[in-house]
Amino acid sequence: MNSSHLTAMLQQVYEHDPNYPALLQAQVSRYQEALTAFRLAFGPGPVYIYRAPGRVNLIGEHTDYNHGFVLPMALEKDILLLARPRTDGRVILRNIEPARFSERSFTLSASIRPGPVGDWANYVKGPAQALVRLLGIERGMDALVVGRVPFGVPIGAGLSSSSALTVVSAMALLDLNHGSMPPVEFAHFCAQAEWYVGTRGGVMDHFTSVLGRRGHALFLDCRPMGEPPTQYRTEWVPLPQQYSILVCDSGKRRANTLSDYNVRVAECKIGVALLQRRWPAVTHLRDVTPERMGFAPANLDAFLAEHLPEEADFAALRHLGLSPAFLESLAADHRLSPTQTFRVRARCRHVIRENQRVIDSAAALRVSDGRRFGGYMRESHQSLRDDYAASCAEVDALVELLAGRPEVLGARLTGAGWGGCVVALLEAGAGTGFMAELAERYRERTGLPLEWFAGRAAAGVNGWKHIAEL
Ligand code: GLA
């Protein structure tokens, strides 16, 4: 392998990490091990390496699919895909952890049959099918996926391992078929391609993985603008050097996140449909602002109480005037149970307030005001816990323990929720020495082990590709 080229590529990603060059050495070994595994699986010859990072969202949760605002950053943790083009349309997928993710294969077509819900190959099938539909790609690949921790993105932790796999697969298949797309278009494409797996997720994860910048958070306005190719408003906000970001994994994983998530998306759409009766121009919760609807910001509760039910089932929603056709397609799109009840008012309150918090947080970050930023993080968590019901006892316990530390300016659930990670903002110069004791207390309370790492804003995909000869 031409390791000097690889080293140069890796340098771009890791040279600002305080553990560089030891980290660089560890990464080179990781890549070498992956190349050896690829050779064993598929034989000698040229191989392309692609990487896509996970992300941590600093603030702006469950706002993206409401055309709102988010403030995430890409992480150094990533997913690698080693690939070699095939002459036919087969895609052969192996994994560096075969006991956990056994081999899969499928043929490129405009209608690829998904595996069972949660199957790892679905995150490759989604972009593959979308690329066939969009560009008619025909060339498959032999591929090895490498996502093992600590360098990989942990699974189900709210750090977007699934979107990183979607992005890296899309990039590989596009590139091996001699295609290319401008970054924003590509991120938008990947977000839609992932709907294949059954979620109705937003664009945040893919945009961060594709557009991430070292040392910066991405302030993203998730409202698409204009006719295709769709554009988005993006701003890279430098992260002030004096603060640091800590990511703590609660160790809690919940099985039915996908259905909880879809119910939340549906609850937001119900809120919009109800408000549309009076304000037809409202297409997403992003449009619900004091200026537009004519209420004082302090009167949001009263406004919502007047226009949205606290709780409603399908019968009640029909009674409120929502059409059976709308409700049927909502139920089908989001795989809703006929007995589902919806807490419409509280869900909408979270999204409306969270949007404002993201705008305010970005402003705080621009002037390096970590204290103010930390305050918004605390509010965000309370809102996710109480209004959006997207937290859980373990994550709440972790946030509470972190909040009790003088080094911590703010802490909140990050990602979809119902388990996974907490992101915290640390005071200038604070180390993580206090974490060992905190982990002990966390284990006493929950019985779960706590893992943590320093969140460093890393570069996104940006055309990252390395070619090796085996
Ligand atoms: C998941 C989705 C994102 C976003 C978050 C919640 O990570 O993939 O699009 O909706 O949940 O903020």
Image (cartoon, rainbow, N blue to C red):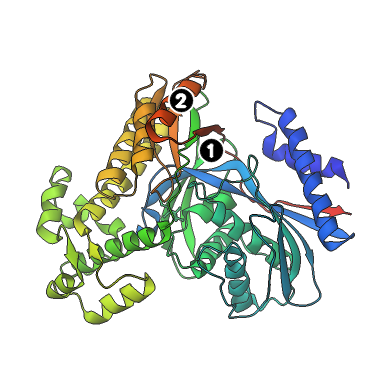
Q: Is residue 361 above or below residue 81?
A: above
Residue 450 location, x and y as percent? 49, 33
Q: How many marks?
A: 2
User: Residue at (25%, 48%) from the top-left corner?
Assistant: 387
Q: Quadrant of the C terminus?
A: bottom right
User: Residue at (72%, 77%) from the top-left corner?
Assistant: 138
Q: Please, what is the three-letter code of the amino acid marked with disc 1?
A: His
Q: Residues within 10 Å of mark 2 (few under 14, many from 20)?
A: some
Q: Is residue 253 visible?
A: yes
> SS class of the residue under badge 1?
strand
Residue 435 location, x and y as percent? 48, 24
Q: Is mark 2 within 8 Å of ligand 1?
A: no
The residue indicated by pointer 2 is 440
Q: Quadrant of ligand 1?
A: bottom left
Q: Please, what is the three-letter code of the amino acid marked with disc 2?
A: Glu
Residue 41 location, x and y as percent? 81, 60
Q: Is residue 366 visible?
A: no
When asked about the image quadrant of residue 304, the answer is bottom left
Question: Residue 312, which numbered label?
Answer: none
> SS class of the residue under badge 2?
helix
Residue 399 location, x and y as percent? 37, 33
- Position of residue 327 in the picture relative to residue 216 (left or right): left
The residue indicated by pointer 1 is 216
User: Residue at (42%, 33%) from the top-left corner?
Assistant: 365
